[in-house]
Image: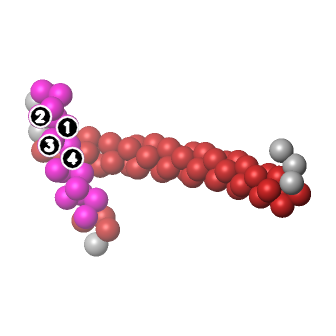
Amino acid sequence: MPILFLVIVGAAAGFLATRIMRVEADVPTTIAIGVFGALLGGLVLRALVTMAGWAAGFVGAVMGALLLIWLWQKVSGRR
């Protein structure tokens, strides 16, 4: 089932991409463009989401450290 889904989504993506780029291609080439484009796009998107996750973790760590410093200053009476 996943392979059939990949072919259907690939065909739709390939059709849309060939129309946007104004490329004339036959049906098997259009499907291949869509399937390989989906694989490539999925890898790139997964890498970007992973990097965004690391960045979000870093931002969260900095914000947590800032909060602890602020609380420490309030409790200890330091400025």
Q: What is the C-alpha distance between the residues marked 1 and 3?
A: 6 Å
Cβ atoms under marks 1 and 2 closer than 8 Å: yes
Q: Is residue 17 magenta?
A: yes
Give residue 1's mark: none
Q: What is the C-alpha distance between the residues marked 4 and 2?
A: 10 Å
Residue type at mark 1?
Answer: Ala
Decide: is 69 above or below 18.
below
The kind of secondary structure element at disc 3 is helix
Give residue 17's mark: 1
Cβ atoms under marks 2 and 3 closer than 8 Å: yes
Q: Identify which residue is drawn at 84% across, 61% down.
A: 75
Viewed as shown, does residue 56 lie left or right of 9? right
Cβ atoms under marks 4 and 1 closer than 8 Å: yes
Cβ atoms under marks 4 and 2 closer than 8 Å: no
Q: Identify which residue is drawn at 18% across, 50% down.
A: 11
Residue type at mark 2?
Answer: Arg
Cβ atoms under marks 3 and 4 closer than 8 Å: yes
Q: What is the C-alpha distance between the residues marked 2 and 3?
A: 6 Å
Q: For the magenta stretch, what is the residue range? A: 5-23
Decide: is 5 above or below 1.
above
Q: Residue tagged by mark 2?
A: 19
The kind of secondary structure element at disc 4 is helix
Q: Identify which residue is drawn at 25% across, 64% down.
A: 5
Q: For residue 36, which quarter of the picture?
A: top left
Q: Residue tagged by mark 4?
A: 13
Q: Residue tagged by mark 3?
A: 15
